Amino acid sequence: MEAQEKELTISHLFDAGIDRVFQAWTDPEKLKHWYAPDRCLIEYKSIEVKEGGRFHYCIQHPLHGKNWVIGTYIEIVPPSKIVFTMQFSNENGEEINNMADKQLATWPQEIITTVTFESLGNQTKALIHETVSEDKAKTTGAYRGWIQMFDKLNQQLARL
């Protein structure tokens, strides 16, 4: 990514306490209900939410097909911070070389996502930072996807 490009940062206010929000990010059963944009399905082949733990999932979009992702949890500090990597992969969990794929060539080979949580009484402010161009995220729909997932999580938290 070029030095002048702004990296993606999104903040969102959830209508639930910090412990419930953090649990929704770290409980695989809860993740599978909200961690995919609208009209998309998520399938986890594996997920181990702990420092050094890995995940492998597929998000299936009705128009764009399947996108496989692998990653590693770098840091988990309950209930205030989660840091993880993401890389595009194939169904077998083997990393894809982004430069060899026309659609992925402008994305970083590895994205680092940092999520911090701040308690604001009965609400929780989440701040997402990703090592990807904000402009690229907005033009490809990745930014909108995060907003849709946050809305789904708010709905899930309201039902619990």
Image (spheres, rainbow, N blue to C red):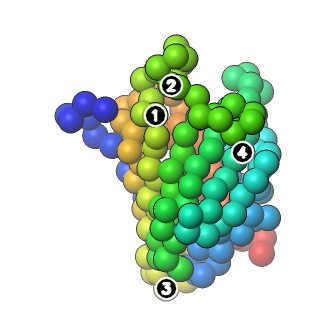
The residue lying at 21 percent from left, 35 percent from top is: 3
Q: Which mark is residue 121?
A: 3
Q: Which residue is mark 4?
A: 57
- Cα–Cα span, label 1 and label 3: 38 Å
Residue most extreme to the left: 4
Circle 1 sits in a helix, a strand or a loop, which is it? Answer: loop
**Element type at marker 3?**
loop
Marks 1 and 2 in Cβ contact (< 8 Å):
yes
Q: Position of residue 39 (x, y in %)?
A: 75, 37
Residue that carries the numbered disc 1 in the rendered image? 109
Mark 3 or 2, which is nearer the eye? 2
Quadrant, the N terminus: top left
**Residue 142: image location, x then y, percent:** 53, 37
Q: Amino acid at mark 3?
A: Gly
Q: Earlier in the sequence, mark 1 or mark 2?
A: 2
Mark 2 residue element = helix
Q: Amino acid at mark 4?
A: Tyr
Q: Is residue 41 above or below residue 79?
A: above
Mark 2 vs 4: CB contact within 8 A: no
Visible residue check, residue 90: yes
Write down the residue under mark 2: 98
Query: Going from the N terminus, do you reach mark 1 or mark 3 first?
Result: 1
Q: Are marks 4 and 1 in contact (CB under 8 Å)?
A: no
Figure quadrant of the C terminus:
bottom right
Q: Is residue 147 left or right of residue 105?
A: right
